[in-house]
Amino acid sequence: MTTADRLTMSLGEAMFTQRAIRRLKPDPIPDEVMRDIMEAAIRAPNGGNTQQWHFIVVKDSDVRKQMGELYHEAWWAKRKDQGIMGPEDIPAGKNSTRSAMRLANEFGDAPVMVFILALNKGGANGIIPAAQNLLLAARAHGI
């Protein structure tokens, strides 16, 4: 069975039910599912078929934990630059900031991390369709 056969959710359903979720499910992601997701990403259209990207897939729990700690530290450093020293300083009604704080707190708990890197300055345009394909394939797998 091919990746295309396993991604059976309709495009419309995937597009219109996809959400920006900052709460991460701890469920492990099987290797076959990750292969489907990554295959969808690398088949994205890109200018001149140059594929000016690298994908870094992090599955090792110790490395994910370290990445989570770094992200948490960087997130709070940026907030401190804005005068927010802790959760109590986040203004009432700033739900998106609170959600982002929760993501910073839980980032290292993600079962898999995928980092998409542009190989050159102009390569960022090519990674956008790849990222969208990745997200749609993950959605089709219920992630």
Image: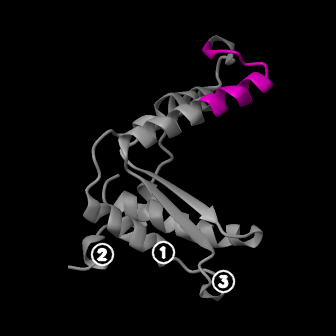
Between 89 and 38, the residue placed more toward the observer is 38
Q: What kind of residue is marked 3?
A: Gly
Between 23 and 127, the residue placed more toward the observer is 127
Q: Position of residue 66 (x, y in %)?
A: 49, 36
Q: Earlier in the sequence, mark 1 or mark 2?
A: 2
| Magenta-colored stretch includes residue 86 | yes
Q: Quadrant of residue 118?
A: bottom right
Q: Position of residue 65 (x, y in %)?
A: 44, 35
Residue ID for mark 2: 3
Residue ID for mark 1: 42
Between 53 and 88, the residue placed more toward the observer is 53
| Magenta-colored stretch includes residue 19 | no
Residue ID for mark 3: 47
Q: Which residues are magenta?
A: 73-87
Between 133 and 77, the residue placed more toward the observer is 77
Q: Tell me how far mark 1 sits from mark 3, CA to CA.
A: 13 Å
Q: Tell me how far mark 2 sits from mark 3, CA to CA.
A: 23 Å
> Which residue is rendered at x = 69% and y = 71% of the image?
123
